[in-house]
């Protein structure tokens, strides 16, 4: 199945983003990701004038990423403007990304370091419907 998709991509029939990426990463791939993240951390802008170039590099990194990383990495990539304004936030994000880089360099795909809630949109709709029914019953009874 995957081989057929790869052939279709090479032939130009399917866009490349339709390929299923492997869940496991080899040590060299993790080392490469760590190296790229370390470079992004090293060059993280301290001035608004440097923001556009850094954002372009961050987008390039995230679009080529073939290994699922914790959501904190995407927050780091998107929050450069906040780090410019808030030194405490910069310090906490730098500490967090340094831990993730360390895991990657050790050959470990890091787990999320925070608490997140992920629901399928179908469940969000069901929850919204239940809340509306409860509100209706409370207000009109």
Image: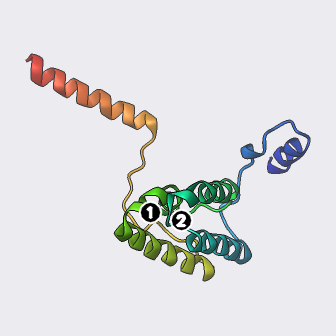
81 horizontally vs 86: left or right: right
Between residues 39 and 86, which one lies in front from this camera angle?
86
Q: Residue at x 49, y 60 (%)?
A: 80
Q: Residue at x 56, y 76 (%)?
A: 101
Cα gap from disc 2 to disc 1, whole angstroms: 7 Å
Residue named by callout 1: 84
The image quadrant of residue 34 is bottom right
Pointer 2 with pointer 1, Cβ within 8 A: yes
Q: Is residue 42 above or below residue 125?
A: below
User: Element under label 1?
Assistant: helix
Residue most extreme to the right: 11
89 horizontally vs 19: left or right: left
Between residues 3 and 10, which one lies in front from this camera angle?
10
Residue named by callout 2: 45
Quadrant where the image shows the C terminus: top left
Disc ID at residue 70: none
User: Where does residue 69 sit, x and y in percent of width and height?
Assistant: 56, 63
Residue most extreme to the left: 141
User: Element under label 2?
Assistant: loop
Q: How many marks?
A: 2
Q: Is residue 64 above or below residue 6?
A: below
Between residues 68 and 136, which one lies in front from this camera angle?
68
Q: Residue at x 73, y 76 (%)?
A: 28
Q: How is the image coloured?
A: rainbow
Could you tell which of marks 2 and 1 lies nearer the N-terminus? 2
77 horizontally vs 131: left or right: right
Q: Is residue 37 above or below residue 15?
A: below
User: Where does residue 136 sit, x and y in percent of width and height?
Assistant: 17, 21
Q: Residue at x 68, y 77 (%)?
A: 31
Residue most extreme to the bottom: 106
Classed neighbour count for the residue bearing mark 1: other residues with Cα under 10 Å, few (<14), some (14–19), many (≥20): some
């Amino acid at each position: 199945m995957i081989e057929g998709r790869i052939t279709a991509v090479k032939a130009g029939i399917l866009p490349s983003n339709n390929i299923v990426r492997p869940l496991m990463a080899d040590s060299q791939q993790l080392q490469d990701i760590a190296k790229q993240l370390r470079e992004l951390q090293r060059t993280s802008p301290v001035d608004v004038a440097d923001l556009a170039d850094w954002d372009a590099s961050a987008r390039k990194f995230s679009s080529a990423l073939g290994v699922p990383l914790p959501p904190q990495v995407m927050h780091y990539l998107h929050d450069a403007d906040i780090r410019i304004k808030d030194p405490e936030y910069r310090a906490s994000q730098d500490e967090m990304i340094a831990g993730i880089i360390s895991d990657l360099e050790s050959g470990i795909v890091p787990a999320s370091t925070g608490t997140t809630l992920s629901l399928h949109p179908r469940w969000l709709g069901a929850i919204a419907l239940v809340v509306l029914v409860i509100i209706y019953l409370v207000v009109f009874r």
